Image (cartoon, helix red, strand yellow):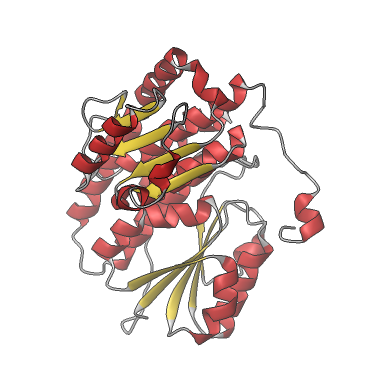
Amino acid sequence: MNQFINSQWQLLPTLLQNTITMPFEEESPKQIIFVGSGSSLNAAKMAQHYFETFSQQSLLFFNVQQYKKQGALLDPHYLVAISQTGNSLAILECLHLASENKNTTIFLSATRDEEKRQYADYFIDLCCAEEQIGPKTVGFTATFIRLVQLALAFNKDQEDRISEEIFVSFKECIQKMPKMKEITLQWLKENPHWANAPYLTITADDALLGVIEEGALKVLETLRIPVMAYEIGEFTHGPHRLIKEGSYHIFLSGGPTTELTERVNLYTQSFTKNTLLITEKAGEITVDLSCETPGVELLYTLIFQVLANEWALQTGFNPDKKVHEAFFAFVGTKD
């Protein structure tokens, strides 16, 4: 897993240079439907802001079962289907269903299988087929960057200057990733007991919901404990009951609810010493960029990748190891 974490600062700048153009029709559908599972859907949610800014379409986010049930009933739409490995049979079924109903299909994947690439009207290569382990790292961030590029492609009237400004910001954030890894490793060195957490909550502003849902999934996959992600307002209406002596909580401070998040963090510290504040300014881990900065999502994501990898190693578990190898063959969801 660590090798794929490190590969991000080589692959991601290359992806930024390979911009996406789409020959969208004049009378284009009014909806974009994103379909995926796990990290794939989290990447779409993390890119939501960019589509809201640059496309004229309304957005919907479906898991594969939701789309299989409702896809034929929806208004004309673009289907953006995501599967890093391309092994999800349900994603391929969703692409087939969308095509049958004459919807334009876009497939984001790193698969090298030419037959699978032909399932969609447009195929967008993630260029990271080597990452075959379960907990996705470079595959996730590659998906996110490709989605941002796709969002920009939807804006027919945009100036090239806007895209250039965004990609310059992304490049600057990618350049900061190795240093952010060092900062996170230093925090881990000073707080080794976190690897023994029985469960974790991760809480942030709604603007960072895709980030923390992916962070929760990464830690769940590697540390193999319950990890729950909450928007800060939601956390204050029930999940706050998880605060108790010895409990573990991560807070991301940024966006409109910064003050509320930091107050909840301060309150939590009255009951447990196991709090981690990740913030734009002065926290235990400091990102040092506004959460509105294009590309800053990569830095927040990296923090959770490093935490997940190192906590697994501290407990003696190799996160590269396949778990339940017979699972997908038994349940029949992947080829």
Q: Residue at x 47, y 26 (%)?
A: 246
Count of residue discs: 0
User: Is residue 7 at least partly visible in the picture?
Assistant: no
| Quadrant in which the C terminus appears | bottom right
Q: Nearer the viewer, residue 282 or 246?
A: 246
Q: Is residue 200 visible?
A: yes
Q: Position of residue 95 (x, y in %)?
A: 58, 72
Q: Position of residue 324 (x, y in %)?
A: 76, 43
In this view, the residue farthest toward the top is 190
Residue at coordinates 26% horizontally, 69% vertically from top-left?
A: 156
Q: Residue at x 42, y 47 (%)?
A: 239
Q: Nearer the viewer, residue 239 or 231?
A: 239
Q: Position of residue 21 (x, y in %)?
A: 37, 63
Which residue occupies 32% across, 23% down? Answer: 284
Compared with 87, 167 (above or below) is above
Give coordinates of residue 20: x percent, y percent.
38, 58
Left or right position of 78 against 52 = right
Q: Is residue 42 above or below residue 227?
A: below
Q: Quadrant of the image for the N terminus?
A: top right
For residue 329, which quarter of the picture? Answer: bottom right
In the foreground, 195 or 327: 195
Q: Is residue 313 left or right of residue 238?
A: right
